[in-house]
Amino acid sequence: MALPALLILDRDGVINEDSDNYIRSVDQWVPIPGSLEAMARLHRAGVPLAVATNQSGIARGYYDLAELEAMHDKLRRLLAMRGGEVAAIEYCPHGPDDGCDCRKPLPGMIERLLARFGVAPERALVVGDSVRDLEAAAAAGVPAVLVRTGKGERSLASGRVPEGVPVYDDLAAFADALLGEEA
């Protein structure tokens, strides 16, 4: 597998632990073991990292933009301590009925990241844990992989994961495969 020109990661369930009750505070934002180290290894290998994340908890009133920024600051700080960085974070603050173009499974966030970095869709790669991540990637013309963390197992059990989508145990296992390392 060739290194992508841009790796677009979902956040909750891929980088950090997920919750059906939403990650509502910086204290609830807890990295999945090995995810930040994997991101740092990918960054050091020259893979630009971006995040595209639905954050409807804002529209629902569960937390505000300042709390979301604090979560992303924590991500950046912990990643920097491991020698990595995120080039961009796109988030959708809208609820499911707001009619935006960015809420996954719509491709708006992914398309904005591709345009921002001048990357053709086929040269990027999305890593997600849900069917909606895969659908957003497909709508943007970007290949995708699924991780079993977060909602990954539930997504696999749904029978809605398209045939041929590679599946990895977690972000660390994906990074191992992409970088050609043994787990």
Image (spheres, rainbow, N blue to C red):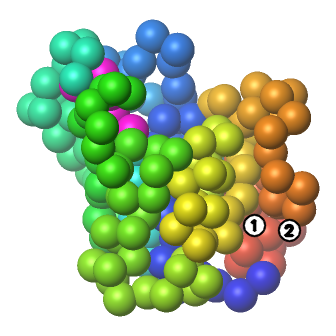
The mark that comes first in sequence, 1 or 2, is 1
Counting from the top left corner in percent of width and height, residue 99 is at 30, 38
Q: Quadrant of the N terminus?
A: bottom right
Part of the protein shown in magenta = 54-58
Q: How many marks?
A: 2
* Residue 22 drawn in magenta: no
Q: Is residue 103 above or below residue 126?
A: above
> Where, quadrant-wise, is the C terminus in this rendering?
bottom right
Q: Nearer the viewer, residue 164 or 147?
A: 164
- Tell me what residue is drawn at x 19 percent, y 14 percent: 61
Report the amino acid beneath label 1: Asp
Which numbered dot is residue 99? Answer: none
Mark 1, Cα crowd under 10 Å, few <14 / some 14-19 / many 20+, is: some
Question: Residue 65: image x %, image y %?
Answer: 13, 33
Seen from the viewer's position, the closer of residues 176 and 147 is: 147
Alpha-carbon neighbours of circle 2 within 10 Å: few (<14), some, or many (≥20)? few
- Is there any visible trace of residue 82 in the rendered image? no
Q: Which residue is mark 1?
A: 176
Q: Secondary structure at mark 1?
A: helix
The CA distance from mark 1 to mark 2 is 6 Å
The amino acid type, in three-letter code, at marker 2 is Glu
Image marks 1 and 2: residues in contact by CB distance under 8 Å = yes
Residue at which label 2 appears: 182
